[in-house]
Amino acid sequence: MCPFCKDKSCKVTERPDGKLACDCGKHSWPNAAVYAEALRRKNLTVVKAVHTWTQGF
Ligand SMILES: [Zn+2]
Ligand SMILES: [Zn+2]
């Protein structure tokens, strides 16, 4: 599913031309490597946010 869409049913699919896009069309990536990098950055952001939140205590 698309990590950037709030709708959890929004799937990311690879197109015949190698591009990846989510079902609603809001997000697209030129290739799988860019998509993987986007996922990685998104996960880093989440981890960092959780870390900051934990430090607040
Ligand atoms: Zn999306
Ligand atoms: Zn979507």
Image (cartoon, rainbow, N blue to C red):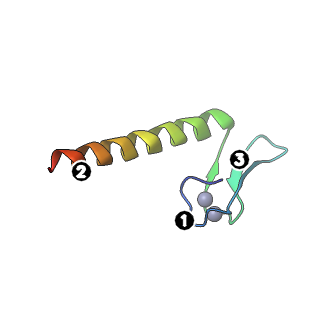
Please tell me which of labels 2 and 3 falls first in the chain: 3
State which mark lies toward you, 3 or 1: 1
Q: Residue at x 27, y 42 (%)?
A: 51
State how far apart marks 1 and 2 are (Cα). Answer: 21 Å
Q: Which residue is mark 2?
A: 53
Type of residue at label 1? Lys
27 in relation to 47, above or below: below
Relative depth, front residue between 18 and 43: 43
Q: Is mark 2 within 8 Å of ligand 1?
A: no
The amino acid on which the numbered mark 2 sits, given as a three-letter code, is Trp
Dot 3 corresponds to which residue?
A: 20
Position of residue 4 measured from the top left corner of the image (x, y, whole percent)? 53, 56
Q: Position of residue 41 (x, y in %)?
A: 45, 40
Mark on residue 19? none
Q: Earlier in the sequence, mark 3 or mark 1?
A: 1
Closer to us: 51 or 45: 51
Cα distance between the residues tagged 2 and 3: 33 Å
**Residue at left offset 53%, top offset 35%:** 37
| Label 3, label 1: how far apart the Cα atoms are | 18 Å
Q: Quick one: SS at disc 1?
A: loop
Does the Cβ of the disc 1 residue fall within 8 Å of ligand 2? Answer: no
Q: Please tell me which residue is depicted at 71% across the width and 47% down the height of the picture.
A: 20
Residue found at x 73% / y 44%? 19
Residue labelled with disc 1 = 6
Of pointers 1 and 2, the one earlier in the residue sequence: 1
Q: Position of residue 47 (x, y in %)?
A: 36, 41
Q: Residue furthest right?
A: 16
